[in-house]
Image (cartoon, grey):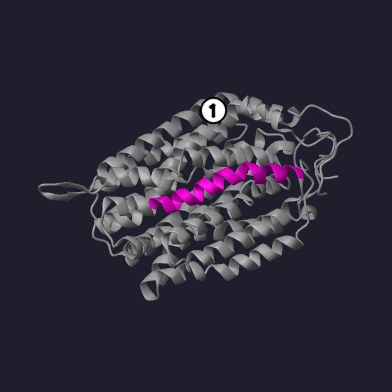
């Protein structure tokens, strides 16, 4: 039955029999469109602001920043509910329904007649993605062993940078040549196709790739105190909160910043998207490989790789402010490369320090917290910091203060990850034995 891992003495089913590559490929493609859908909005934000609010004002930026907040609030609130469902029922149908739902809501965003309707549609996109976010990494964890997860998670989360870049590029190109509304419509058909493919996938056995003791029943809500008492999980999540605040805020306002620096919107979105794609892909894969290769050689390797990358990125973010174009593009590349270096290792930590019977809810809790305290609030907060500030000499924009805020928060993320080094190896070893209290013969539905 689903929810039971094989005894620790039995080796996992060979990867080729579990169809690991096919699983990873489909989930990677879905994650790609996940981030395309998100960043199409960011790319056309100046046009949305002009359409609904007439253009320049401090309040207009705060209002459009709420579009990101609405998406993330619904996403983070719904994630624990869907995480719980993913721990109890088959995950592929849940993923398929979620992808279809958010794709339709994305298309509806392009048809919204009023700003209020657009805000509601972004909330439905968040609810759809909440059904996918907690399930996907747990499926991957069930078909790849712990020692390979940083590299494999890196492939999966590589879609963040590529999808974000494509969202910038597609949104900017379509808005420039047709209309900003069309940018939301063009991504709907691929999303629907990927959602339908999920219904033909075979559900993997939970814990098949772990040396985990099988749970006698599904975890109850009170059992998740185990996760909150795991230092590696708590420190990793805290670091991801800081990182998510920084990335969410600065990426949302980057098109506006580039136009402030005199770069045309279409050109800026295209170049920045290209840089984000190349830097994100190479850094995400390199960070995952580095984490797996250093695992067993240095203490808490996944945490060490994550901390090193974010600390290198911090001064590069500030250097962008004082570097003239076109040289600023090179500084952005370096900043983004090391910003994405942690992606594979930090997500592998979440998988490796939680028991398979509660892993989806653990990921969902992580999603809830990092968005609640991260990018759900950072776009309007940074929008308020940026301004404009009106004084006798005219309008003044405080991008220097916004970038400094982002850099300082990134440094905090590095400190939290570095502290996690002392706990990771122990927590990884204990995770397969951290079971919910055993009850009589209960089993998990949905096998």
Foreground pick, 51 / 396: 51
Foreground pick, 343 / 40: 40
Residue at the extreme right of the image, as rendered: 441
The answer to whether residue 177 is above or below residue 270 is: below
Residue at the extreme left of the image, as rendered: 392
Q: Is residue 280 visible?
A: yes
Q: Based on the displayed image, in which of its 4 quarters is residue 361 positioned?
A: top right
Q: Residue at x 77, y 35 (%)?
A: 211
Q: Can residue 273 be seen in this view?
A: no
Q: Residue at x 38, y 64 (%)?
A: 270
Question: Label 1 neighbourhood size at 10 Å, few (<14), some (14-19), many (20+)?
Answer: many
* Image x and y of residue 208, in percent: 78, 43
The answer to whether residue 61 is above or below residue 429 is: below
Instruction: Count the labels in the image.
Output: 1
- Determine whether, in the image, residue 90 is placed left or right of residue 113: right
Q: Residue at x 79, y 46 (%)?
A: 205
The answer to whether residue 98 is above or below residue 180 is: above
Magenta part of the chain: 65-88
* Image x and y of residue 124, in percent: 56, 56
Residue at the extreme bottom of the image, as rendered: 178
Quadrant of the rendering where the N terminus is positioned:
top right
Q: Which residue is drawn at 80% across and 32% down?
A: 213
- Determine whether, in the image, residue 270 is placed left or right of residue 262: right
* Image x and y of residue 130, in percent: 60, 49
> Magenta residues: mostly which secondary structure?
helix
Give the labeled residue for mark 1. 420
Q: Based on the displayed image, in which of its 4 quarters is residue 21 positioned?
A: bottom right
Q: Is mark 1 on a helix, strand or loop?
A: helix
* Image x and y of residue 175, in percent: 39, 70
73 within the magenta span: yes
């Amino acid at each position: 039955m689903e929810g039971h891992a094989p005894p620790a003495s039995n080796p996992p089913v060979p990867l080729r029999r579990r169809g690991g590559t096919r699983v990873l490929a489909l989930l990677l493609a879905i994650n790609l469109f996940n981030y395309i859908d998100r960043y199409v909005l960011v790319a056309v934000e100046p046009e949305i602001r002009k359409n609904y609010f007439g253009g320049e004002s401090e309040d207009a930026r705060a209002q459009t920043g709420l579009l990101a907040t609405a998406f993330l609030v619904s996403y983070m609130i719904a994630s624990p509910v869907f995480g719980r469902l993913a721990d109890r029922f088959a995950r592929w149908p849940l993923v398929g329904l979620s992808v279809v739902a958010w794709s339709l809501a994305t298309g509806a965003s392009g048809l919204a007649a009023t700003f209020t309707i657009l805000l509601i549609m972004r909330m439905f996109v968040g609810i759809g993605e909440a059904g996918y976010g907690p399930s996907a990494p747990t499926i991957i964890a069930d078909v790849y062993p712990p020692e390979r997860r940083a590299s494999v998670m890196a492939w999966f989360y590589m879609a963040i940078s590529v999808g974000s870049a494509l969202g910038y590029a597609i949104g900017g190109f379509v808005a420039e040549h047709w209309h900003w509304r069309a940018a939301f419509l063009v991504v709907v058909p691929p999303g629907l196709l990927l959602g339908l493919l999920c219904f033909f996938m075979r559900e993997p056995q939970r814990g098949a790739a772990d040396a985990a003791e099988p749970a006698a029943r599904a975890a109850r809500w009170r059992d998740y105190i185990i996760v909150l008492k795991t230092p590696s999980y708590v420190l990793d999540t805290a670091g991801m909160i800081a990182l998510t605040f920084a990335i969410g805020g600065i990426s949302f306002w980057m098109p506006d910043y580039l136009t402030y620096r005199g770069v045309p919107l279409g050109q800026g979105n295209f170049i920045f998207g290209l840089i984000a794609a190349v830097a994100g892909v190479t850094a995400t894969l390199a960070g995952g490989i580095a984490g797996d290769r250093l695992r067993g050689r240095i203490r808490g390797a996944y945490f060490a790789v994550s901390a090193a990358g974010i600390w290198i990125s911090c001064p590069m973010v500030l250097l962008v402010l004082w570097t003239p174009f076109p040289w600023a593009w090179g500084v952005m590349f370096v900043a983004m490369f090391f910003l994405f270096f942690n992606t594979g290792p930090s997500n592998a930590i979440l998988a490796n320090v939680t028991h398979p019977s509660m892993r989806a809810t653990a990921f969902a809790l992580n999603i809830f917290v990092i968005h609640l305290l991260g990018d759900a609030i950072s776009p309007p907060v940074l929008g308020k910091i940026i301004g404009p500030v009106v004084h006798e000499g005219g309008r003044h924009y405080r991008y220097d203060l916004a970038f400094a805020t982002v850099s300082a928060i990134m440094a905090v993320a590095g400190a939290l990850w570095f502290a996690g080094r002392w706990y990771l190896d122990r927590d990884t070893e204990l995770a397969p034995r951290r079971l919910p209290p055993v009850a009589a013969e209960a089993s998990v539905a949905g096998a």
